[in-house]
């Protein structure tokens, strides 16, 4: 029926199935050439549309996330960091913690891969089609202080509770002043109430979080109480990955120099 042939394209466009509309000709020809069933044809057309939509959602989520740089789990050398349980991280990468509203806290000294792992799990979240937002504790505090001074704190708070995952990097690198600490506490509290997952990284042991929260141990323990209620804590020990790499490189150059010296003497 010729009349339906024209409706196919117009209908797909009206329904905003733009990728299916673009693919219609090619997929129809392929279906005819390979004697596909009608269902196979429809399945293939929709598959293209759904894949493209997912891809656009991931790209938007990656943009929205404001990651300082992209890091993947595949780039993480688990052998170099035995303190990190590969199987645990792989379990986290299934994204189950997101639907369970579980938090993840990476603790450890500088350079051991806390931010790398936080970003990599953020990328996984985006790839699952969810919204994720990355910030540092101090940026979060400043952003909220600004919002408070401009009378738009509740809107900003809402923006921070909406993403499926909120990553707060570098908790404790800089001490938060009052009322910054209390604004960060409110964010933690609001996400906790909505069972929104968070990933935090910190170089400070929990026992020192009182200093982080404007020297207020009561606020710190109230924050920890909420964070740790449903939480996976990953304690990373060991030396900085960068330093280790540098040392390995120096060792290698040492070997090269030795060989050069032997060659020169022979
Ligand atoms: P932290 O946040 O704990 O201070 P980072 O995550 O910023 O440390 O790591 C410092 C650098 O070393 C980053 O470039 C990171 O990608 C890299 N790095 C750290 N640990 C590893 C690892 N185990 N495998 C690969 N790269 C690593
Ligand atoms: Mg870091």
Image (spheres, grey):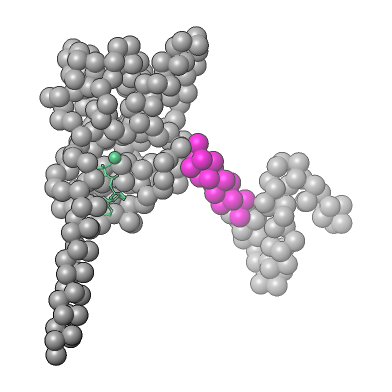
Tell me if residue 185 can be seen. no
Q: Please identify the quadrant where the N terminus is shown.
A: bottom right
In the rendering, at what x and y percent does residue 230 appear?
Answer: 24, 29
Q: How many marks?
A: 0
Tell me if residue 192 can be seen. yes
Magenta residue check for 47: no
In the rendering, at what x and y percent does residue 260 appear?
Answer: 19, 80
In the picture as drawn, the residue positioned furthest to the right comes out as 3
Residue toward you, 115 or 96: 115
* 54 to the left or right of 28: left
Q: Which residue occupies 66% across, 72% down?
A: 34
Residue toward you, 114 or 227: 114
Residue toward you, 46 or 70: 70
Q: Which residue occupies 67% across, 51% down?
A: 19
Where are the magenta residues, as a range? 48-64
In the rendering, at what x and y percent does residue 219 appear?
Answer: 22, 14
Residue toward you, 104 or 261: 261
Q: Please identify the quadrant where the C terminus is shown.
A: bottom left
Image quadrant of residue 23? Answer: bottom right
Q: Which residue occupies 45% across, 26% down?
A: 162
Secondary structure that dominates the magenta span: helix
Question: Regarding ligand 2, which quadrant of the image does it lie in?
Answer: top left
Image quadrant of residue 111? Answer: top left
Q: Against 129, is 262 above or below?
A: below
Q: Against 12, is 190 above or below?
A: above
Image quadrant of residue 44? Answer: bottom right
Q: Against 45, is 107 above or below?
A: above
* 243 to the left or right of 24: left
Q: Which residue occupies 68% across, 68% down?
A: 30
């Amino acid at each position: 029926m010729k009349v339906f042939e024209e409706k196919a394209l117009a209908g797909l466009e009206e329904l905003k199935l733009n990728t299916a509309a673009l693919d219609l000709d090619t997929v129809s020809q392929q279906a005819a050439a390979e004697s596909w069933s009608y269902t196979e044809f429809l399945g293939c057309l929709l598959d293209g549309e759904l894949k493209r939509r997912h891809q656009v959602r991931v790209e938007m989520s990656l943009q929205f996330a404001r990651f300082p740089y992209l890091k993947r789990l595949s780039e993480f050398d688990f052998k170099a960091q035995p303190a990190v349980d590969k199987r645990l991280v792989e379990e986290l990468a299934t994204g189950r913690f997101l639907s369970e509203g579980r938090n993840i806290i990476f603790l450890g000294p500088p350079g051991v891969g806390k931010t790398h792992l936080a970003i990599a799990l953020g990328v996984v979240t985006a790839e699952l089609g969810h919204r994720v937002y990355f910030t540092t504790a101090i940026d979060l505090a400043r952003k909220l202080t600004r919002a408070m001074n401009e009378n738009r704190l509740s809107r900003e708070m809402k923006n921070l509770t909406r993403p499926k995952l909120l990553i707060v990097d570098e908790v404790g690198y800089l001490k938060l002043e009052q009322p910054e600490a209390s604004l960060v506490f409110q964010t933690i509290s609001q996400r906790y109430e909505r069972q929104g997952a968070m990933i935090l990284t910190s170089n400070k042991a929990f026992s020192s979080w009182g200093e982080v929260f404007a020297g207020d141990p009561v606020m710190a323990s109230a924050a920890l109480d909420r964070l740790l209620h449903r939480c996976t804590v990953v304690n990373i020990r060991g030396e900085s990955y960068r330093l280790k790499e540098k040392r390995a490189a120096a060792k290698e150059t040492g070997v090269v120099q030795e060989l050069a010296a032997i060659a020169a003497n022979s």
